[in-house]
Amino acid sequence: MNRIMNCGRENRLRAALVSLGVIALLLISTSPAYAHGAKIEHRVSTTIDIIATYDSGEPMAKAQVSVFAPHDPQTPWLTGMCDAEGKFSLSPDPALPGTWDIQVRQAGHGDIIHVDVGGDRATAGGAGNFSAVQIVVMAACVVWGFIGTALYFSKRRAD
Amino acid sequence: MHIPDGILPAAVTVAGYATAAGATALTIRNYRREDIPRASLLTAAFFVASWIHIPIPPTSVHLVLNGLMGVVLGPMAFPAILIGLFFQAVIFQHGGLTSLGVNATMMGLPALLGYGIFQLRRLFGNGNRTSTAVFAFLGGALGLGVAALIALILLVTTIPTYMDVAAERASIITLTLAHAPLMIIEGIFTALVVLFLLRVKPEMLGDHAS
């Protein structure tokens, strides 16, 4: 009687082991990559790259950079330094959308640009980025204005 | 030399405008119509001068010519420099509109000093070409030197605390020292211009050159 009972337990145990083995085999055969699981997380960020140069074309090497977030235009959100080529990169906090001010300064010279984060617009703070030809033409017009003024008053004096 | 917008505190820029307005009012009070052609031509030269860069390692500087303005124009140099600086700010982005008063004061008052120095040549007799050249040199050189000194003081005393103050101060001092050779250049240039004008058109130098 005991032998019959033991025999029944062994059969159930064997059946359970076989079932587990089949399940394990199925898992292994259908999902071979489970042992090398990969996980990709992502975060969208904006990087602002600037190149600071003097109007003579020289890079503002080692110039100091001060970055002001939209919520506090008085205290820099980040300070840093341009490299030897006048380059500097920063990643503004996307949680602070608005206009970011980036000032580059060296020996009392420099400029500030305003970059919209959260929009697609970046505007320079200077009066304009003219080409050399445009500047020469404008300067020539101004010089001619001065010469014209001189000629006008010379003529009046002669009269 | 030109201080751009956004560098100086607002109080300093306002004080600069106040000083420039007062100096302009004082200097144009006794202007004569016949001074205008000369002032206009010198303003054109002053305007273009800042476009001429001179490399003085480790930096580079540009011509200023405020001392020459003072020597040749006398008191009219101040309004002439003010107008020249306005066009430099608009066309070249040298300096700025908010800092226009500061820059005019910084360069205009030393120009008047240059004029005063040039007047000292009279102590050695009128028509003395040597003393004329020497004092023209001194007026041109010291006009620029004092302007650079004023810029140094303004910039060093207003460096924002969030910056690396030591590094910024060092770069300001380096740039100021680079103006020492430029003082020599502008002094010589001023002396040459004055001697040339004395020879070909002495009336260009006005009453203070006779």
Image: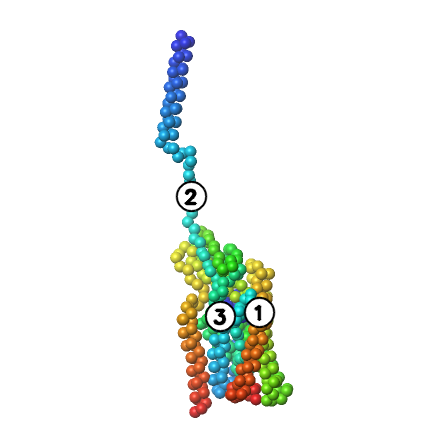
Chain ID at mark 3: B
Question: Residue type at mark 2?
Answer: Glu
In this rendering, do the residues under marks 3 and 2 share a single chain?
no
Chain ID at mark 2: A
* Mark found first going from the N terminus, 1 or 3: 3
Quadrant containing the C terminus of chain A is bottom left
Q: Position of residue B86 (x, y in %)?
A: 47, 74
Mark 3 surroundings within 10 Å by alpha-carbon count, few (fewer than 14), some (14 through 19), many (20 or more): many
- In the image, residue A121 sits, relative to residue A26, either above or below, namely below
Visible residue check, residue B101: no
Report, in whole angstroms, how far the alpha carbon at label 3 lies from the one at label 2: 48 Å
Q: Position of residue B9 (x, y in %)?
A: 54, 66
Instruction: Determine the secondary structure under disc 2.
Output: loop
Residue located beneath label 2 in the image: A41
Report, in whole angstroms, how far the alpha carbon at label 1 lies from the one at label 3: 18 Å
Visible residue check, residue A109: yes
Q: Is residue A5 left or right of residue B169?
A: left
For the residues bearing labels 1 and 3, Cβ distance under 8 angstroms = no
Instruction: Determine the secondary structure under disc 1.
Output: loop
User: Which residue is pictured at 57% across the width and 89% down the height?
Assistant: B210
Question: Residue type at mark 3?
Answer: His
Chain ID at mark 1: B
| Quarter of the view holding residue B167 | bottom right
Residue located beneath label 3 in the image: B94
User: Which residue is pictured at 39% across the width and 56% down the height?
Assistant: A119
Quadrant containing the N terminus of chain A is top left
User: Which residue is pictured at 50% across the width and 70% down the height?
Assistant: B95
In this rendering, do the residues under marks 2 and 1 share a single chain?
no
Residue located beneath label 1 in the image: B178
